[in-house]
Image: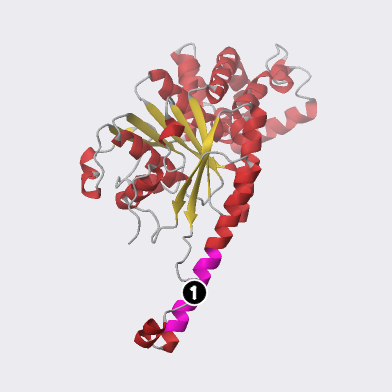
Amino acid sequence: MTSVVPLLEGKRIVICAGSGGVGKTTTSAALAMGMAAQGLRVAVVTIDPARRLANALGLAQLGNEPRLVDAARFAPHGVEMRGELWAMMLDAKRTFDEVIERLAPDAATRDEILANRIYQQLSSAVAGSQEFTAIAKLYELDQEGGYDLLVLDTPPSRNALDFLDAPGRLTGFFQGRAIRMFLRPAGFGGKIIGRGTGVVFSLLKRVTGVDLLEDLSVFFRSLSGLIDGFTERAERVGALLEDPATTFLIVTSPQHDPVEEAIYFHRKLEEAGMPFGGMVVNRIHAPTRTNGEVPAELVDELGEALATRVADSAREQAALAERDHAAIDHLEAALSSPPTVRVPELEDDVHDIDGLALVRAHLFGDAKEPQ
């Protein structure tokens, strides 16, 4: 396959998943750039704290709301932007707060929860909160209906279930026996807090000035009115992952560990019934034409020492290309020959629009062959 376009036809959401260090953020941005260049209104969402997306797009920073990238930035790099490219970097904590703001029945409840110390810690630390908020942000942008296509750059997939199961695990938290126990009328004044525990809370309050028991009581009391809404939202977010208009693209590189991660993630997608679109394999070494042999006339021109170094480098390149080819064969066999777009190893790291434009050209099948 020479272009990702057939994989994206009819899709509203593209989720780029894979292990770390395989060019996932770059691929997400280049996909979004390419579809925007074709005339669509596209938003790319990253949760990359290294801010590589902002740097590559030539922006000082990205926030928790999509920001329009000036189309004039792309013209000098050979990309005619017929549509619009928007970009944002997810703030998981802020997105979690926004969900609370939407679900709170009134301003007083909203303010009480957001100011609560227990909530402030929980919203940052709940298992899967980053993954859940990434999908929740997609859900919000999708519901607003302002974009033709949304592209999500996900966290590394080493714990694939953290992403795929995030909505379900968050629902389980709010429906679990422990939290239901806290919400009973007896609450913390009943059997849950024993005499010894009460002494600890009292001592903590005297030493630190923090009434942890009161904070817990206020938090769970305030949260009780939001549980049904939160559960419904989590279910809708989960349904978004299974929607036929959503597709997962697995991004990898042709090394052993990323390939095994890709195979594992694909299996989890199948088990969860998620829509799989295809593969993007980055950083593939090209085979050499001479197989490490330097022509005699070039040896005379370079000198024997330099010619030997050139030959060694060519043989190393050939070995890397052979390794990459074998890894891709293994990947395709394990996944029953999925649609696969290949992107070669580039001379430099992608850190600007010029690099993104080059990756876009390879993804969309219009890259020029090297001379």
Left or right of 25 in this view: 166 = right
Task: Say which residue appears at 29% left-offset and 36% top-offset.
Answer: 37
Residue 185 image-quadrant placement:
top right
- Which residue is more in the foreground, 170 or 353? 353
Task: Say which residue appears at 58% left-offset and 18% top-offset.
Answer: 235
Task: Say few, some or many: other residues with alpha carbon within 10 Å of mark 1 (under 14 / 14 to 19 / 20 or more).
Answer: some
Res. 233 in view: yes
Q: Which residue is mark 1?
A: 292
Which quarter of the rendered picture does the C terminus lie within? Answer: bottom left
Q: Is residue 223 magenta?
A: no
Return the x and y of residue 117 as percentages of the image width and height.
Answer: 55, 30
Magenta-drawn segment: 307-320
Identify which amino acid the numbered label 1 is placed on: Gly
Return the x and y of residue 129 as percentages of the image width and height.
Answer: 56, 32
Magenta stretch mostly in which secondary structure?
A: helix
- Which residue is more in the foreground, 192 or 131? 131
Res. 206 in view: no
Left or right of 219 in this view: 106 = left
- Which residue is more in the foreground, 241 or 208? 241
